[in-house]
Image (spheres, rainbow, N blue to C red):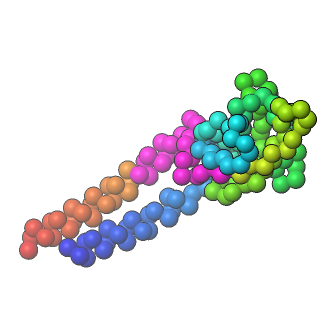
Amino acid sequence: MKKCFAALLVLLALLTPVLAAQAPDDGAYTVELTMAGGTGKASIASPVEITVSGGEITATLIWSSSNYDRMTVDGVYYYPTATEGGSTFTIPIALDKLMEISAETIAMSQPHDIAYTLYFDSATLRDSGDGCALWAAAAGAVVLLACGAVAAVCIRRRAAK
């Protein structure tokens, strides 16, 4: 029985990194955002829509306030693509890394840059309809079937003794 359990662990150890290491294919996704900093009065809607194209990832951020007129990411200025229903920006992002950004608000008597830290968690990555979710479900089913097959062989061997 110990050999079967060990075989099951080896199988899972071999398959898990292969599935987890897959970078998102080109397409549209959503991902959960964690945000820190600022005064706590403004927020960014989460989950966030992201687009992957040629290995580059951009996110569409929708602030709870329409008073943001500029964001700075790695020294580059980004301006809103819309202001109705909250300032909307499209910026480049990295998954699973803390991103230091600033956002300029005009809500006070004069414009102020406010520092924020953003984190886009790849563990929450979800397909927006291009079929990746179906692939992930199929991969999960293969893992479960392989584990079930190993368990079945172990049970048969034990019963035969």
Q: Which residue is depicted at the point 57% across and 57% down?
A: 22
Quarter of the image where one finds residue 151:
bottom left
Classify residue 156 by image quadrant: bottom left
Residue 107 pos. (x, y %): 83, 31
State the image coordinates of residue 14 (x, y, percent, origin top left): 44, 68
Residue closest to the eye, 139 or 108: 108
Between 90 and 129, the residue placed more toward the observer is 90
Q: Position of residue 72 (x, y in %)?
A: 84, 47
Q: Residue at x 74, y 30 (%)?
A: 65
In this orientation, which residue lies closer to the viewer: 56 or 43? 43
Q: Residue furthest right?
A: 110
159 on left or right of 88: left
Please give left or right for residue 150 compared with residue 134 in the image: left
Question: Considering the image in quadrants, where does the N terminus appear?
Answer: bottom left
Q: Can you say whether 108 is above or below 54 in the image? A: above
Image: magenta residue range: 118-140
Vertical position of residue 32 compared to residue 155: above or below: above
Residue lying farthest top? Answer: 84
